Amino acid sequence: MPPTRTQLSQAYPIDSSIDADGRLQLGGCDAVELAREFGTPAYIVSEDDLRARAQAFVEAFRTRTKDFDVLFASKAFPCTAIYRVLAQEGIACDVASGGELSLALRGGFDPARIYMHGNAKSVAELRFARRAGVGHIVIDNHDEIERLEAVVDDGEPQPVLLRVTPDVRGRTNDKISTGQADSKFGFSIAQAPAAIARVQGSDRLDLVGLHMHIGSQILELEPFRLAIEAIAPLGDFSTYNLGGGLGVAYTADQEPPRIADYVAAKVDAVTRVLGPGKRILDEPGRALVANSTVTLYTVQSVKRNVSTWVGVDGGMSDNLRPMLYDSVYEAQVADRFGGGTLSRLAGKHCESGDVIVREVELNDPRVGDVIVTPATGAYGHAMANNYNGVPRPPVIMVSHGDARVVVRRETYDDLAARDVE
């Protein structure tokens, strides 16, 4: 019998534990009982973890600077209940579409503290942002300058930031790297001066500062410092949005920088390079929500050929990241932690690439077992889809032994809800 793991890795929500019977507890709730009550697959979100990480970011900035705002980069988990919790914790909001804006407003965010960005905003989205009273719009390209001016017309000038690509990138997957010169986002360093002059010359736009973002899941601090140095020659502004990008632990062997160290690196670089007294904005998305959430599955089959294939009732419809980015996750049997059987955790979809974890040690996996994969709060729900006609999972929020549905499971009827006869 393989030894049982008694300590959870940092990939799990902070209020998780393994009880005396070896069963995973999430927010005071038994993981296996959650699976029985709500079905699987299901996203289980620790509300206390969400609140604690929000507070940690705010406190880390507060100890370093007086003028700042922490923005939830909401593409990571665009769910009304998540918006609501983070709004309650005093976080501002970053949206990348009209749909995210609608959810942010529904979740209780003050529109004046919403920042809207994106590389291809439509006229309809810009008009929606103006009607809603969005505080700042991040201009991405020359075409958008004219489009936004037309939307503003003769109304009050719209506060804007200008997005710049600093030609700096961290070590991360190419598909989530955004700071390199050849990027779909923002103005290059060479193009930025003309764009800045153009916006400063507009009587309909009020340029308050610059925006940049170099990518996501970055596990080192030096690229953030280099990016700040790269934009310094572009001029002196009151406000700098430094993007986000802090990586998280998806597995036990990943050690992301501490929130306090990440904040210190950015704030100290701004003070040193750009000068004191700047308003600093930061957009943690993944680092706010990834580790708040686990996904529960039920084993449907255990097949042995060259490998041991453990087939579960979800996969690429609820977690697309392993297929898009070769992302690596942990997995365990929820009431039997430990190793012993080298397995491939496979999804149910008709794709050979539908593998959630390619190599994982599971404790004697059997049909009917509940499997848990941690760190699925970022881009799980956000990228959920209906491939093979699979209904999307529910979102269940847990806290102090209470569990409640905040997004219901889709039904087969929902799959046809938009059909027109």
Image (cartoon, helix red, strand yellow):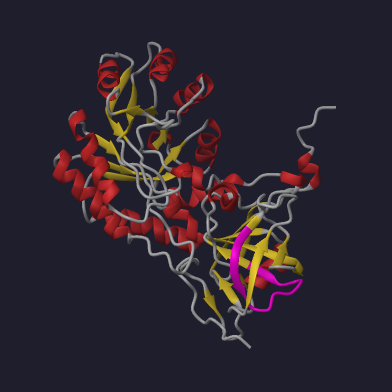
Count of labels in the image: 0
In front: 243, or 348?
348
- On the image, the x and y values in percent for residue 52 come to 41, 61
Q: Quadrant of residue 183?
A: top left
Q: Is residue 367 above or below residue 188?
A: below
Front residue (pair 304, 135): 304
Q: Is residue 30 visible?
A: no
Q: Position of residue 213 (x, y in %)?
A: 36, 40
Answer whether residue 367 is magenta in the image: yes
Quadrant of the image occupied by residue 248: bottom left
Q: Nearer the viewer, residue 402 or 324?
A: 324
Q: Is residue 282 left or right of residue 339?
A: left
Quarter of the image where the C terminus is located:
top right
Q: For the N terminus, which image quadrant?
A: bottom right
> Would you say 113 lies left or right of 385 here?
left
Residue ID at (59%, 45%): 383
User: Residue 410: within the magenta?
Assistant: no
Q: Is residue 278 left or right of residue 176?
A: left
Residue at x 65% of width, y 65% of height = 344
Q: Residue at x 21, y 29 (%)?
A: 234
Q: Which portion, as a residue range, is magenta?
A: 356-371
For the view shown, which residue lies furthest in the bottom direction? 1
Q: Measured from the top left, where is residue 168 in percent x and y?
A: 31, 40
Instruction: Find the residue positioned furthest to the front.
Output: 306
Q: Is residue 14 above or below residue 83?
A: below
Residue 272 image position (x, y, % from top left): 14, 45
Can residue 76 be seen? yes
